[in-house]
Amino acid sequence: AQSVTQLGSHVSVSEGALVLLRCNYSSSVPPYLFWYVQYPNQGLQLLLKYTTGATLVKGINGFEAEFKKSETSFHLTKPSAHMSDAAEYFCAVSEGNAGNMLTFGGGTRLMVKP
Amino acid sequence: DAGVTQSPTHLIKTRGQHVTLRCSPISGHKSVSWYQQVLGQGPQFIFQYYEKEERGRGNFPDRFSARQFPNYSSELNVNALLLGDSALYLCASSLGSGTREAFFGQGTRLTVV
C-alpha cells in the first residue's frame, strides 16, 4: 500500500525567502510522484511530476522537486517566495499498477509574509 | 480548450437525501476519477472509471456509486447523506486508465445539514 506524509501542516516564510515543503512516501513499487497546489475554493493544479529519468524535476512558477529513493522523499523547493505562492500544497503518489489512483498527503499550507 | 467541468459548484442537502454530482472530462480524455476532500485534509480516492467500466474503488461505503457515460462524462451518486459527507468533491480526468497525470476540476462543495 502506498502512503504520503507531509511534514508540517503549516509553513510560514518571508517574501523572497527559500520555500521548502517536505514530502515522504511509502510505496512497494517504483512510484510516480506529484505536487499539486490548491488556491482557496479551487481545484488542484499540477505543479510538477516525477515518473522516470532525471530525479530533479522542474515545474511551473519556479518550483522544483528532487526524487531521492534512498530517503523516500520528494521535497518541493522554490528559491524565492512570492506573495502569490500562498496556498495549500499537496504531495501525491501513484503506484505503477494502480492506474491513475492518487494517494495524497494531508497538505501543507504555505503562508508568505511581506 | 475547456478543462474539467463539474456541476453544480455548490449545493446544500439535508441528511438522508440523495445527491448526484456531474463531471465532464477534458476532450479526448477517457478516464474519470472522483475524490472527496474534507475540510483541512488531502483528497481521498473514491472511484476511477475508464471506458465506462469501474477500474478502482476506494474505501467508501456502498452509499457511494458512480457511472461513466458513452461520451466519457461521469456522475457520482451518494445516497442517505450523512453530515460527514460534507466535503469538496473533485473530479479528475486522464487520457487513459494507466496515465499518471490527472487534471482536476474546480470541485463541487456539498454541505449536508
Image (spheres, coloured by chain):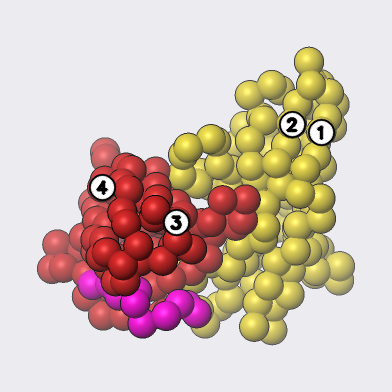
Magenta-highlighted residues: B58-67
Q: Residues within 10 Å of mark 3 (few under 14, many from 20)?
A: some
Q: Please, what secondary structure does the residue beneath circle 3 have? A: loop
Q: Mark 3 belongs to which subunit?
A: B
For label 1, the crowd category at 10 Å Cα-Cα, with few meaning under 14, some 14 to 19 and many 20 or more, is few
Query: Residue A111, labelled with which disc?
Result: 2
Subunit under mark 2 = A
Of callouts 1 and 2, the N-terminal one? 1
Q: Which of marks 3 and 1 is in front?
A: 3
Q: Which amino acid does label 1 sit on?
A: Ser
Residue occupying image coordinates x 56% and y 51% = B39
Q: Do the residues labelled 1 and 4 touch (CB within 8 Å)?
A: no
Q: Mark 3 points at which residue?
A: B86
Q: Main secondary structure of the magenta part?
A: loop
Please give the residue where the numbered disc 4 appears in the rendered image.
B7
Q: Which chain is yellow?
A: A
Q: Tell me if residue A44 comes above or below residue A106 in the rendering.
A: above
Whether residue A9 is visible to the viewer of this picture, yes or no, is yes
Q: Which residue is drawn at 69% across and 21% down?
A: A83
